[in-house]
Image: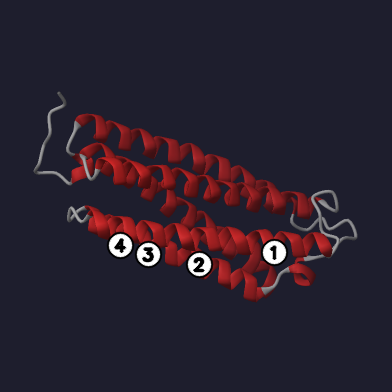
């Protein structure tokens, strides 16, 4: 049986959990490289409109602000969920995890509607290099958020079935790291893709 160190937070109490969390940090390093590559591609192609719609013609500040508010709020609620987890409060943890996922689902819904609007305006991946790099960058991020929602739902099921244990706490903590990472990526998207093109 794995040795449990009760002096540590629940998610760090076994060596296996500590190794898994370390491994996930390494995985996030690979994700940083992936998104850095997509940002670099976007940076190289962002001015190639090929006669198609420009960012000033497409981007709607209201939709972007709604997406940003939903995702950043979900990061805050995710933090509250971990706060409850470390106090062994399963009900509080589940409540705030579900709120986090609802906010994440709202973000995905608004982003899908945003993409549909762009397509109706004649902006598709085939229209220009700018739009190709834009859709790939935002689509990759949106896919990550969608996968995160599905992953978190599976963890919620495990929490309901098994309660708070070092194993379920570790899994919950790892999904929280993933969720915060996606929020950080969105801040870069909001700043360098949307805000920079609206202001300059």
- Mark 3 and mark 4: span between their CA atoms? 6 Å
Residue named by callout 3: 76
Who's the residue at 75% across and 51% down the image?
45
For the image, the number of numbered tags is 4
Q: CA distance from mark 2 to mark 1?
A: 14 Å
| Residue 46 position within the rendered picture, expressed as x and y whole percent measured from the top left | 74, 56
Q: In the rendered view, does 78 fall on the left or right side of 190?
A: left
* Contact check, label 3 and label 1, Cβ < 8 Å: no
Upstream in sequence: badge 2 or badge 1: 2
- Residue that label 4 marks: 80
Q: Quadrant of residue 82?
A: bottom left
| Along the line of sight, the residue nearer the viewer: 154 or 72 | 154
Horizontal side of 84 relative to 186 (left or right) equals: left
Cα gap from disc 2 to disc 4, whole angstroms: 15 Å
Question: Which quadrant does the C terminus fall into?
Answer: bottom right
- For the residue pair 37 and 110, the one nearer the viewer reads as 110
In whole angstroms, how far apart are the C-alphas of marks 2 and 3? Answer: 10 Å
Residue receiving disc 2: 70
Asked if residue 136 lies left or right of residue 54, the reply is left
- Residue 155 drawn at (x, y percent): 37, 43
Q: Which structural element holds mark 2? A: helix
Tag 4 or tag 2, which sits nearer the N-term?
A: 2
Q: Is residue 94 above or below residue 140?
A: below
């Amino acid at each position: 049986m794995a040795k449990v160190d009760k002096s540590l937070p629940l998610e760090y109490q076994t060596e296996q959990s500590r190794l898994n969390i370390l491994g996930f940090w390494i995985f996030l390093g690979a994700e940083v490289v992936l998104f850095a590559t997509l940002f670099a591609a976007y940076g190289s192609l962002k001015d190639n409109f090929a006669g198609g719609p420009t960012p000033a013609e497409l981007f709607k500040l209201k939709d972007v602000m709604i997406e940003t508010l939903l995702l950043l709020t979900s990061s805050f609620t995710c933090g509250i969920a971990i706060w409850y987890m470390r106090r062994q409060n399963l009900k509080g943890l589940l409540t705030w995890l579900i709120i986090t996922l609802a906010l994440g689902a709202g973000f995905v819904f608004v982003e899908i509607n945003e993409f549909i609007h762009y397509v109706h305006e004649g902006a598709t991946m085939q229209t220009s290099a700018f739009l190709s790099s834009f859709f790939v960058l935002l689509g990759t991020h949106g896919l990550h958020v969608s996968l995160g929602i599905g992953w978190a739902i599976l963890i919620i099921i495990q929490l309901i079935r098994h309660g708070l244990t070092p194993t379920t706490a570790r899994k919950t903590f790892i999904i929280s790291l993933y969720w915060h990472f996606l929020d950080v990526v969105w801040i870069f998207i909001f700043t360098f893709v949307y805000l920079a093109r609206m202001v300059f």
